[in-house]
């Protein structure tokens, strides 16, 4: 049997305005313009004031032009005279002589007008270049189908990552071409002769060997390079040069020349032909910091943020429906207009709060890391976490995290991800707290200055850092090195 009872609960929920603000905070500047346009399209009560001002100026110019009134009067008179006639002559609309096209073209642009033309990128793709070389070969119908299928399975780097046995089944099921593994390998060897050299390889070893074997007059260094790749490829990739010298009985000079020949090769031949299809990714900074003779100035990048306002039409409609005597008849229309106006107000307020939150948060970060923004020296970075900035601006940590996420700041020393300025602290032997980014910078400088024939190991790097006053463990040095994408000492070794 069910028992009825009263129960009180206290729940904390975000209002729709707060949810909207949180979503807008984490949007970078490059995506904010599109979000505003989307809101303008969905909400007719929201308008872009700049576009409306341009339209109003255009209408005012037309109204002030006296010639336009004369033209309209003349058109009206002609219209009246034509209406007085019951019939019209079809010859008035048909001209026996064709008007030349050059007379219909008008060039009303002056030399001072800004002309914006969209450049179109044209070029030959990687697959199209291979297919054009394929057409120069005398192949049967089945061989052509196999070759096209192989070219279609090449990745952007020019490698064939599909198994030969699987391609036999693919051709049988999809194109009804009965073939064998030997037939596919024969066509593949032909494609490996195409340009760029190394295309159609199934792994890196085969790619480098194809390029070396295409050299018409191989030198001793090229022959040694082929020997190394064929017999000692694993030792070469792991830079076990002592093992190669011991097994191959070659001199150190021969090994050095052979490695120089290998380093000249292209490990990704397909990428050399995809320049026309590459897209450049430009970073649009959300903040800009200027150094004005030792005084830091912060500017919020709001260049692509339009000025929003409520639609005057909808405001008038709301006043008209509210002042109407028969409100019950216009209840649905009144509710709709009120919802749209409220939604527009919320969005405008959210945009303003977003700008204000970004401004005060970035000012706090700029003042906190003032020494770095003045000098650009990464060793001047202070340890900073989200909680430090949240306490300064009196905002929640989650809000600071949304501001720092995917936002970029342009400084006199480059454009950086805002999140990269946050780092943990570590205590030195003297008791001073330093940023982990400062330690990474010193670690990177030590590795750049090392002798490449004898690179520094993690133990040696740990000793160097301890001598500088940074008491950290070897595994911590290894972790920082991996975060900097620096390989181990053995893979950094050079002859």
Image (cartoon, helix red, strand yellow):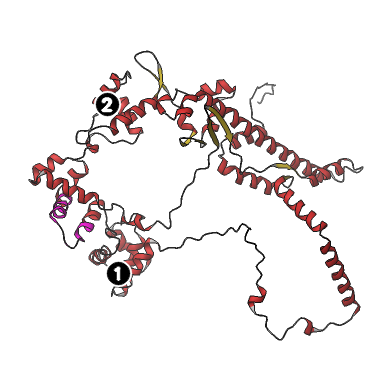
Q: Quadrant of the N terminus?
A: top right
Q: Is residue 20 magenta?
A: no
Q: Position of residue 84 (x, y in %)?
A: 91, 78
Q: Is residue 292 above or below residue 335?
A: above
The residue that mark 2 highlights is 461
**Snapshot quadrant of residue 190:** bottom left
> How busy is the neighbourhood of tag 2: few (under 14 within 10 Å), some, or many (20 plus)?
some
Image quarter hosting the C terminus = top left
Q: Residue at x 51, y 23 (%)?
A: 368
The kind of secondary structure the magenta stretch mainly shows is helix
Q: Quadrant of residue 447?
A: top left
Q: Magenta span covers which residues?
A: 210-229
> Label 1, on which residue?
178
Task: Name the residue at 19% across, 59% down.
Answer: 213
Rendering coords of residue 322 (x, y %): 86, 40
**Is the residue 132 above or below the residue 270 in the image?**
below
Q: State the SS at label 1.
A: loop
Q: Secondary structure at mark 2?
A: helix
State whether residue 311 is above or below residue 398: below
Task: Find out whether the residues at labels 2 and 1 contact each other: C-beta distance under 8 Å.
Answer: no
The number of discs equals 2
């Amino acid at each position: 049997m069910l028992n009825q009872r009263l129960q009180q609960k206290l729940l904390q929920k975000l209002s729709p305005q707060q949810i909207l603000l949180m979503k807008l905070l984490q949007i970078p500047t490059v995506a904010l313009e599109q979000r505003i346009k989307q809101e303008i399209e969905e909400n007719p009560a929201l308008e872009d004031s700049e576009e409306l001002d341009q339209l109003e100026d255009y209408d005012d110019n037309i109204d002030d032009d006296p010639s336009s009134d004369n033209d309209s009067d003349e058109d009206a008179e002609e219209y009246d005279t034509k209406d007085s006639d019951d019939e019209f002559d079809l010859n008035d609309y048909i001209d026996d002589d064709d008007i030349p096209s050059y007379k219909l073209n008008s060039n009303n642009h002056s030399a001072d007008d800004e002309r914006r033309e969209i450049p179109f990128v044209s070029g030959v793709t990687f697959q199209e270049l291979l297919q054009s070389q394929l057409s120069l070969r005398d192949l049967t119908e089945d061989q052509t189908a196999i070759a096209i299928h192989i070219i279609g399975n090449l990745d952007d780097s020019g490698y064939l990552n599909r198994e030969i046995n699987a391609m036999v089944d693919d051709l049988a099921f999809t194109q009804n071409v009965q073939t064998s593994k030997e037939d596919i390998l024969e066509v593949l060897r032909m494609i490996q002769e195409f340009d760029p050299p190394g295309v159609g390889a199934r792994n890196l070893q085969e790619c480098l060997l194809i390029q070396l074997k295409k050299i018409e007059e191989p030198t001793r260094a090229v022959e040694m390079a082929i020997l190394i790749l064929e017999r000692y490829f694993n030792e070469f990739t792991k830079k076990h040069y002592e093992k190669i010298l011991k097994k191959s009985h070659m001199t150190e000079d021969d090994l050095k020349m052979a490695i120089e020949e290998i380093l000249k090769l292209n490990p990704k031949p397909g990428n050399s032909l995809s320049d026309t299809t590459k897209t450049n990714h430009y970073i649009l900074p959300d903040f800009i910091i200027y150094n004005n003779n030792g005084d830091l100035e912060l500017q919020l990048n709001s260049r692509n943020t339009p000025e929003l306002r409520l639609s005057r039409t909808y405001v008038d409609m709301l006043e008209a429906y509210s002042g109407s005597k028969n409100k019950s008849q216009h209840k649905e229309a009144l509710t709709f207009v009120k919802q749209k106006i409220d939604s527009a107000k919320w969005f405008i307020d959210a945009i303003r709060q977003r700008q204000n939150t970004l401004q005060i948060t970035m000012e706090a970060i700029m003042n906190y890391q003032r020494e770095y923004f003045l000098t650009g020296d990464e060793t001047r970075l202070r340890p900073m976490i989200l909680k430090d900035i949240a306490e300064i601006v009196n905002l929640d940590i989650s809000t600071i995290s949304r501001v720092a996420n995917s936002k970029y700041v342009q400084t006199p020393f480059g454009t950086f991800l805002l999140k990269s300025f946050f780092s943990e602290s570590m205590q030195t032997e003297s008791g001073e707290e330093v940023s982990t980014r400062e330690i990474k910078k010193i670690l990177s400088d030590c590795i750049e200055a090392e002798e490449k024939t004898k690179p520094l190991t993690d133990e040696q790097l740990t000793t160097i850092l301890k001598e500088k006053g940074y008491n950290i463990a070897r595994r911590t040095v290894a972790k920082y090195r991996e975060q900097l994408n620096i390989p181990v000492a053995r893979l950094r070794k050079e002859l």
